[in-house]
Image (cartoon, rainbow, N blue to C red):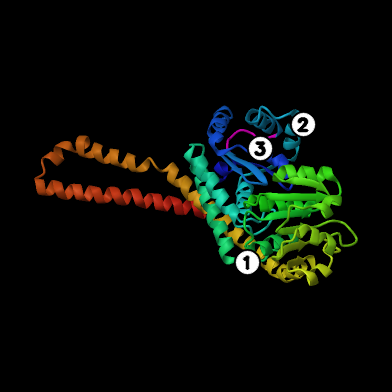
Amino acid sequence: MAKEVLNNLHTIAFTHRKFEVTKVGLLHIPLDEQFNRLSPIKRSFSLQELLMLSTCNRVEFSFVTDETVNLTFMVSFLSALYPEMDAQDLRAFVVHVEHYQGMEAVDHAMSVAASVDSMIIGEREIITQVRQAYEHCATLGLTGDLMRIVNRHVVETAKKVYTETSIATKPVSVVSLAYQQLKKLHIPLEARFLLVGAGVTNTTMGRFLKKHGYRRFTIFNRTLAKATTLAEEFGGTAYPLTDLKNYISGFDVIITCTGANHPIITPEIYNQLLQGETQSKTVIDMAIPQDLDPRILDQYPVKHISVDRLQKISNENLQERSKSLEAVERIFAEARASFEEVLQIRQVELAMREVPEQIKRIKSDAVNEVFKSEINALDPQSREVLERVLGYVEKKYIAGPMKLAKEILVKHA
């Protein structure tokens, strides 16, 4: 019974693994528009429940339906929800969508909330986003009993992962480590960032900076078009790399990662970039070989985070991370088993929710019709004792069979 119910749970996900983040952004629906756009979809597709999760690098829809969810369904779903989407984008989304059903959907939800599925593994913010997405859709009347149980279990599991493992404190990717090192420096939100290079590394780093409130970005790249694309995404300004030596607007942080085979930030260029400022600056150099000329470190006060330093930390964390992921999988395995039990019990509760009312009706019929004359013949004291006996039997009869039914169904699930 529970497996049949769970099999109606589906999640379709559009994430950073299959799409550029700018493409994922096309699917975002502002909170204040979600009711007017999602409610008609829920009705027209006969969905019992519907939930939308939207973050900077993923948009997911979870829903409960007994309809077949296939290519035709997804085309119709996206077309109805995004009528303004052109055919090319629609086709790309449908071809590369991630579809999870039943327990796989629950597993996916746990991986998302525990940040195992994130661009930066161990980022705690996602658990809040998951919880808030559910609360918002529940407030709109879009979700129901199954989503409530799933969300509660998923959030509890994610909290356990963060509490009992070091997944949030032992990153291994260079970008993850660089971002954590930057956070430790308490860089203010108004800081001026120079991104030198517009490849995958700087793009990922920039996205997380923007996500956490940073807004002042200037991007330099050999190919101006790539810098311009990134600048448009970040709300910044783009320049060709050759203009770096002429830049006069100052900076607080440089994040550099290019494919140059020699230092591209020389002492002369660095001095130009300073524009006479004397306070310590931060430079994160993730290039191999380094983009920052080592002489700069001798001549200027710099908080320098090099790829060598990051790689050393990564190697130290790698062994711990493998232990963490093993621990996470154990937690997930326990969560799967407990979730199936919780769902079984809930199905019993739903199936037997009319039992108490039926017993009350039987008692009422016995007292007021079948044995009415005999009861009326009793003296007040005897009638009071009878009422107490019937009340006791009613209470025990309701609790006992329900408890027994739960134990039997869970045992044989």
Mark 2 or mark 3: which comes first in sequence? 3
Label 3 SS: helix
Give x and y (percent) for residue 342. Answer: 50, 52
Which of these two is toward me, 313 or 103? Answer: 313
- Residue under label 3, please give it: 27
Label 2 SS: helix
- Confirm or deny contact between disc 2 and disc 3 (CB under 8 A): no
- Residue under label 2, please give it: 88
Please, what is the three-letter code of the amino acid marked with disc 2? Answer: Gln
Whether 286 is drawn above or below 70: the answer is below
Q: Residue at x 52, y 53 (%)?
A: 341
Q: Residues within 10 Å of mark 1 (few under 14, many from 20)?
A: some
Across the whole image, how many numbered discs are drawn on residues?
Answer: 3
Please, what is the three-letter code of the amino acid marked with disc 1? Answer: Ser
Is residue 149 at all visible to an observer of this figure?
A: yes
Which picture quadrant has residue 319? bottom right
Q: Residues within 10 Å of mark 2 (few under 14, many from 20)?
A: few
Give x and y (percent) for residue 361. Answer: 29, 38
